[in-house]
Image: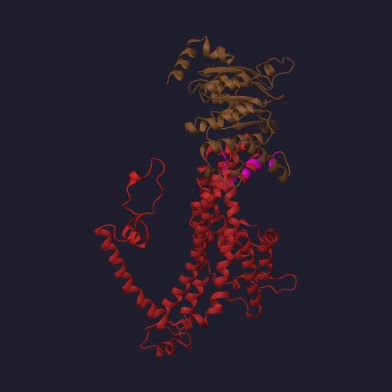
Amino acid sequence: MANETQSAQPADESQGSEDSKPIITIRDMHKWYGEFHVLKNINLEVAPKERIVICGPSGSGKSTLIRCINRLEEHQQGTIDVDGTELTGDLKNIEKIRSEVGMVFQHFNLFPHLTVLENLTLGPIWVRKTPKAQAEEAAMMYLERVKIPEQASKFPGQLSGGQQQRVAIARSLCMNPRIMLFDEPTSALDPEMIKEVLDVMIELAESGMTMLCVTHEMGFATAVAHRVIFMDGGEVIEQNEPREFFENPQHDRTKLFLSQILSH
Amino acid sequence: MKLKANTQEFEPGTHPDWKAPIATSGPIAWMRDNLFSSPFNVILTLLAFWFLWTIIPPIIDWAVIESVWNATDRRDCWAQMSEPEAGACWAFIQSRLSLFIYGFYPEPERWRVNLCFIGLVLFLLPILWDKCPGRKVLLWYCIAFPFIAAWLLVGGALGLPRVPTNEFGGIMLTFIIGVTGIFFSLPIGIALALGRTSNMPALSILCVIFIEFIRGVPLITLLFVASTMLNYFLPPGTTFDLLMRVLIMVTLFSAAYIAEVVRGGLQAIPRGQYEAADAMGLTYWQATRLIILPQTLKISIPGIVNTFIGLYKDTTLVIIIGMLDPLGIGRAALADAEWSGLAREVYLFIAVFFFLCCFGMSRYSLYLEKKLHTGH
């Protein structure tokens, strides 16, 4: 499976296109939680259609980093520029960026009081002002894509974890985002369900979506990522193309981390 | 289906589901589980049966079998029984029924109260029943109803003669205070809860002060303030109807409690729900209305209905400032020499009236909880 997708991966498709300017630019970014310095001097450029996997030990700031990109967390220093708009306290800008950036959470965060279909159409109807019928049609298309159209009228509480996460992915896609953020999308799932979610993510990757993914699924990283970023203690320690990253890590901290996650 | 069938007969993975043995399902199992599960429970069950056996027959005897429904006064009533005071004298309640319902509302105008009551049923129907036919149109009517009701009851405009509010009384008064309080305290309470949890410090502090002040003072005190002191605060010469003042005080009082109940609900919503709504690009008001409040109100239903039931029963406190709700009417009726000594009947009647209303609310809230349950 991994080998197939890897060979199908057109590595040059995005990285090679130097003419396109970065869709996300983070410069000298710092963040504190009270006194605690969680993110230190982050510099990151993401090209359109680029797929990045961010890994690192817990508490390394990787989730916080991607949550800064859609301003679920506020940064205190430096600049974050998403799709030509700088993230500041301006609510209008924040809402605009959020509607362009989809996010998938570790615990799915589906709306339990709405059916699957209503979960999917809520954003398009209220944020994009899409007519209901049209939003529902699009939602069914995305449910087909994540392979659970038959669950449309159920409530999230009636689905398995893997199904819920696929609904969550479809919900983000319904907004036609330009960028997708994944915050440990498979960490809360049973082993049997991880694959169904990863399959959907791999399919999404092949369709050319810009993706930033916090995950420890190293198979997924090798299969689809253009770049793997390793973070520790709030800093980017090392980043490289996946094969290089796994086979020839430069930094001692990276080597230790990789030996720990690969040996269990 | 045979219980003695050997499990070995089935290949692994092909064992069918068997019917549960009688001992784990059915009425016998239920009785064994719930009534006779231990020696102590057997004793409790028997005691409960004995207790019911001793109190229920006499009550039925008094309230139904020996009761008298038509009589001119107390003596006449007792004369019709096997012995005086052996049964209930419902004739008394019957003779005062219109007083219990309308208070001192002038008789020729009472059709207005009846019409208003029909209007109230039409008002509650679309609110309480989401599959009600023509609900969309009726909801517009619901918004207009408080004003229609005020016009019908008070009059003084568009051809209806004015009825002073101090002639209101009885069950009608209870309904007016109860329904107004419930209808307006919910939105005010929700707004206060959102204000208190808001991250705008000035708004939040204002809401905290309001809630804590109102909650920290007994309702009776607020009613006294309404009936006497409010005039000192208002510009001289303004008259402000007493019933109106009571309505405002009761509404604010229960709004403060609703606010705290709703705040509890807000805190029970996982942070992920706010984050998912934010990440989607919804505005604060969209997220609040579409994601947060529906879930908050659902989990707050028991607390909200609890507050409403409390409010409804607290309407009897207006007796203190001279308004005659059913309890006040009852006390006044008992002062009549021809009927004195029938307190049991009067208070039982009032108790049953309040119980039916409150029990109705409680059952409705259970129905609502069940309906909104979406499985987890």
Rendered hue of chain B is red
A13, above or below A105, in the image: above
Magenta region includes residue B279:
no
For this view, does B13 lie left or right of residue A118?
left
Q: Position of residue A71 (x, y in %)?
A: 62, 29
For this view, does A197 lie left or right of residue B347?
right
Which image quarter is the N terminus of chain B in?
bottom left
Q: Nearer the viewer, residue A203 or B205?
A: A203
Which chain did the image draw in brown?
Answer: A
Task: Report the residue at 42% width, 80% height from top.
Answer: B64
Task: Report the residue at 71% width, 60% height from top.
Answer: B137
Numbered label tally? 0
Residue B314 visible in the shown view: yes
Q: Which of B350 and B227 is in front in this view?
A: B350
Quarter of the image where one finds residue A237: top right
Q: Which of A74 and A101 is in front in this view?
A: A101
